Image (cartoon, helix red, strand yellow):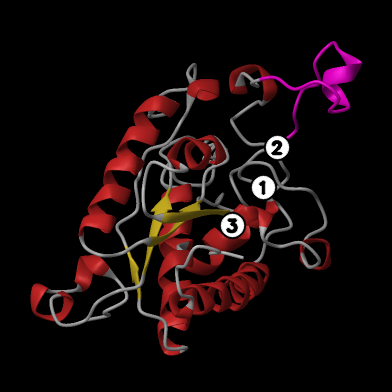
Amino acid sequence: MRPWILAETNYEYTKNHAYEVAVLPLGATEPHNLHLPYSTDTLEANAIGERVCQAAHERGARVVLLPTIPYGTETNMRELPLAMNIDPATLYQVVSDLIASCVKSGVRKILLLNSHGGNELKPLLRHLAGKTPAQVFVCDWFKSLDGVYEEIFSQPEDHAGEMETSLALAYFPHLVAHTEEGGLTADAGATAKTRFEAVNRGWVGMTRPWHLLTTNSGSGNPHAATKEKGERVMQVLVERLSAFLAELSEAEIDERFPY
């Protein structure tokens, strides 16, 4: 039994060992170019959550990893087969209910560990402010690599590119599809530009229809990916996020928290 993983933990342990922090990972079920599984975001969330919480546990944190939510918001992939959508309002309600369950069990420090770009969770935190005694944080782990991303990867990552493929090669390589010659079955992950310069340059935003943006749902070239790059990403995430969880576990919730 790994007591930092709720799915493996029994009631004898939980009733005698109070947790201070709960980590709720959020994944998705969606296409990832031609070479990665539909569960890529969920598998990444599992792999990262398990290792981050283990490292935090070893630092003395009373932390528990909740089971990953395997579905996310897929409205921009609605034209692609079996992109399993949960509308934002539904997702927010599910997460709110799970937060309430944590609070009922005495766990008031919660980290939402998000692995899917379509899950915009900051509006939920604003909605919950003042409505729950929980102190809720959100981490889009793919935004936690500042200062090192460019040292590891040669190209920017959006979806099923070099970074995600490297993580897959490191942590679920049996699910990465290869050609008979040994290369990835993926295309190069090229994306189309809109007809508007302001959108293309990021001055104006929009929801991108993925069937028009991409050829096979991939955005970002995966062909330079390696297992070693995935392991380096994991090392950085474990160092940064386990330190936060250990600090959060020790922190007292008072009238000035988190300041």
Seen at 53% across and 59% down, the residue is 168
In this image, 157 relative to 185: left or right? right
Residue 50 coordinates in the image, percent (x, y): 40, 70
Q: Residue 182: in sight, yes or no? A: no
* Prevailing secondary structure class for the magenta stretch in the rendered image: loop
Residue where numbered disc 1 is placed: 161
Q: CA distance from mark 1 to mark 3?
A: 15 Å
Q: Earlier in the sequence, mark 2 or mark 3?
A: 3
Indicate the amino acid at tag 3.
Trp
Q: Quadrant of residue 149?
A: bottom right
Residue 141, numbered label: 3
Q: Secondary structure at mark 2?
A: loop
Indicate the amino acid at tag 1.
Gly
Q: Examine the rendered structure and indicate whether residue 44 appears above or below residue 213.
A: below
Numbered disc total: 3
Q: Secondary structure at mark 3?
A: helix
Q: CA distance from mark 2 to mark 3?
A: 21 Å
Q: Examine the rendered structure and indicate whether residue 31 appears above or below residue 59.
A: above
Q: Are the two marked residues, 2 and 1, in contact with CB atoms closer than 8 angstroms?
A: yes
Residue at the limit of the structure toward the front, as seen here: 255
Location of the N terminus by quadrant is bottom left
Q: Is 103 inside the magenta-drawn segment?
A: no
Residue where numbered disc 2 is placed: 189
Instruction: Read off the magenta span.
Output: 188-206
Q: Examine the rendered structure and indicate whether residue 192 appears above or below residue 174.
A: above
Q: Residue 53: in sight, yes or no? A: yes
Seen at 55% across and 22% down, the residue is 76
